[in-house]
Each structure stands twice: as C-alpha cells, then as structure tokens.
Image (spheres, helix red, strand yellow):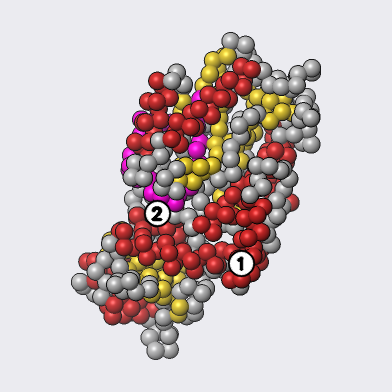
Amino acid sequence: MVRTTFLLLSILFFLSGTVMTQSGMPLILSLEQQGMLRDDWLKERFTTVVPDLMRREGIDMWIMITREYNEDAVVRTMLPSSWMGARRTTMLVVYDPGEGQPLETLACARYDVGEVFKKAWDQEQQPDQWARLAEIITTRNPQKIAVNRSASFGLADGISSYHYDRLLEVVPKPYSDRIVNGERLAIGWLETRIPAEMVVYRQTMQIAHEIIAEAFSERVIQPGVTTTEDVVWYLRERVRELGLTTWFHPTVDVQRAQEQELYGFGGRPGAEIIRPGDLLHCDFGITYCGLNTDTQQNAYILRPGETAAPEYLLAAHRKGLRLMDILTEGFRTGRTGNELLQNTLTTAGEEGLRPTIYSHPIGYHGHGAGPTIGLWDMQEGVPVNGDYPIYPRTAYSIELNNRTYLEEWQQDVRIMLEEDGFWDGDRFTYINGRQEELYLVPRQK
C-alpha cells in the first residue's frame, strides 16, 4: 500500500507542478485511491504531528469518547477511510510514555479502529467498557489527561455532556483531578498539515479553480439569458458530476452601475439575469481527499465591442489584491488573529484602502480550527478565537473585500476576494496561486 500511495503522490506532484502553465481539469483519484492516501496520512500524523502537539501542550494522555451519529469532530478525522462514522460508543486513548518512546494508540472498543488504534478491551474478561477505560488510565498513571472540551471552539468541544460526567464518575481520584480541557491539542491536530497533504491540497485547489473557470465562461453564461442562480446550480451539478462534494451552497452575484448596493452578508442575493457590463462574483468550495477549499473570484461580462474590462474595474481589483498582500505579509508565528487583523486594517487605511477582513483557517473543515482573523461584523477583533496564535504548517482562507468609489458607476464597488494559502513558519504562499486578472465572458483569444 505504501508503494502505491507513493506512486499516487508522485503523479499528483507532477500534475500540481503544471498548475500555472496549463489549463484543464486534473486527474481526480478514485474513492479507493483517496482512501489509501488518507489512511497513510493518518498513520504519518500519529508518528509526526501528535507527539509534538502533546509535548508542546504538556499532555501525556488524550482521551476521546464519542458514539455513532453524535461524532466528535476530531474523532471523525481520525477514523479509517472505510468508516463512515463511529460505532456504538467509541473510546480512543493516546498515551505518551515519554523519553522519546512511541505513542500508545488504543481503542477501548471491541475491535481495532483502523490501523492506528489497537483493540484494548476484551468484553469477555471485563464486561464494563467504562471500567476498562479506568483500568487503561490507572495502569499508565498519566499526569495530565486531555478531553475535547471547549467553551469557544466548537471543533474542539466534541465530548458530550453525558460522556464527560460519566468519565468523572468512573475514573478514581487522583486521576479524575488530572482531567483538563484539550482545546489546544484538538485545534493543533486539526490545523496542522503534513507535506503529503499539501501535495494533494494543491491538486484540490486546482480542481476548484478549474470549476470556477468553466462556470465563468460562455460555456455556461449567455448574457441576457443566464441568471446568477443558473450559475450556482451549474457549480453544484459540476461538482457532483466529478464525484466530489461541496461543503456549502455556492453564491453567485452581480454588481453593476447605478443600481442598488450588493446584498448584505447576513442573507443570500436574489436571482439576477446576467447582463453585459456586470461584475460577476462567486463564493465556492469543494471537498476532496478530506480537504476543503473556499474561493471567491470575479468575472467581467463584456459589452459589445469590448475586448477587456474597463480600467476602473481593473484598478479596483488591483486594490483588492493589494489588501490581500498586506494581510499575508503580516503573518508571523505567535501573532494572534486579532493582532494580524489590526495590523492589516491599520496599514490598509494608511494606503487609502477601505477594507473589511474576515479570514479564517481551513483544512479538514471549511471554517477550520485556529485563529479567526476578523469577522465581517467584528472588525474591532474577535474575542477568544481571535486571540489564538498562528502556528507553522497551517492553511488559511484569505477572505476579505475592499470598497472603491467608481465615478463611472456613481457608487461603490466591493471587490470580494478569497484564496487559500499556507503558512510554513517563514512565508505565506497561495496553495495554487490566486486570481490576478478578472475572467472575461466571452473569453478573448
């Protein structure tokens, strides 16, 4: 399996190297191939990511308890690819014996959980699953036991109220006093990317970009006939046709001269017939190999006789790109989301921009675990979630907009942009580039 997975990654690496030089839909792996990759990633992550996280946070035992149809968000990312969810009550235990020894990864369950978690409960010898969990804990004598419990980060709050109370009941003192919230451990697991994942992430982003390029073309849009909702449903159908999924319903909207301002972020835009002279915008994301994308790009609908978008729109778009640059140039390991937000807003204001920032981590979840960098309605900072620091090897959706007043339109245009990128600890790079120029409909030769 490892040799086959290496071959698949080699193919993907070759294809991802051609992203910016050729167009066309790239190879999409079969479900079996995707599962092989994800299972190998899981094994690698428990060898490389989890030990570092547990030692960083001073945790020597991590316990996750979940059950079918009420799965912990973290546990779902640790299940083998052939599992669609937890089975009965699933208890996973990760123990760090210290002194450079490998982790113990145990399943207090009737069976192994994939290749990572080995069965550690024999119901014939110990009928009570909870009593067996207590035995696993006491025989290892951990000093700090983490559970996925958090007041502010939903993805790190996976243990149910019942399971938490039951755990405190069955674990004897002094061990019950050693149970702590594993918030940062859970976030660290979800936000940290390994190199093998990043090879496929570039492929995933290329697929998303190609779907948008198809949707923003004369293949889909007939000005004066096609509506924004037609394009929305093209995106949905195209994703299904490719055997992929979306993690949210797409948005497609227009801005045009001397018309009512664009919809507010608290609701969806209505269906509009797309006309020549419109600035068309989409918000779109897919899921592939367990990785999510979140992208906003723009197109201009050419008027008769035009071969390019008007300079005033191009200039507004360039200002949006500059705002993205200001934000990504501010990335520093240890800097919080709120610090990055305020740094960006201050610098952008000094340059005469009119920004709104609402960027976020991305990875196993579209709105991922990690530092929130503004919300559209919270530009002064986001309590708690915005105070979380930036760590290396993490991915982000750089999501924002900049307003520019257009004399030609007698109103503002709002350039809304979003592209996914990666912070390696030294520099920020876009996973598959970003949209530097507006799409044109129809395309020009």
Q: Going 33% across and 50% down the picture, which residue do you hit?
A: 151
Kind of residue at badge 2: Ile
- Coordinates of residue 154 in the picture (x, y in percent): 41, 51
Q: Is residue 169 visible?
A: no
Q: Magenta stretch?
A: 375-402
Looking at this view, name the residue that lies furthest to the bottom.
125
Residue 322 at x, y = what percent? Answer: 50, 27
Q: Position of residue 57 (x, y in %)?
A: 30, 59
- Name above or below for residue 228 compared with residue 198: above
Secondary structure of the residue carrying tag 2 is helix
Q: Nearer the viewer, residue 93 or 6?
A: 6
Cα distance between the residues tagged 2 and 1: 27 Å
Q: Is residue 277 left or right of residue 431?
A: right
Quick check: can you spot residue 47?
yes
Q: Secondary structure at mark 1?
A: helix
Residue bearing the label numbered 1: 5
Q: Position of residue 82 (x, y in %)?
A: 59, 69
Q: Which amino acid type corresponds to the residue marked 1 in the rendered image?
A: Thr
Q: Quadrant of the C terminus?
A: top right
In the image, residue 285 sits, relative to residue 105, either above or below, namely above
Q: Which mark is residue 295?
A: none
Give the quadrant of residue 23. Answer: top right
Crowd class of label 1 (few under 14; some 14 to 19; many from 20; radius 10 Å): some
Residue at position x 43%, y 64% from top?
48
The residue wearing badge 2 is 187
Residue 235 higher or lower than 168, as above or below: above
Measuring 69% from the left and 62% from the top, which residue is drawn there?
30
In depth, the one of 388 and 258 nearer the eye is 388
For image coordinates 53% across by 18% down, the residue present is: 404
Question: Residue reaching furthest left?
Answer: 174
Per the image, is 380 magenta? yes
Of residues 26 and 167, the one drawn nearer to the viewer in this rendering: 26
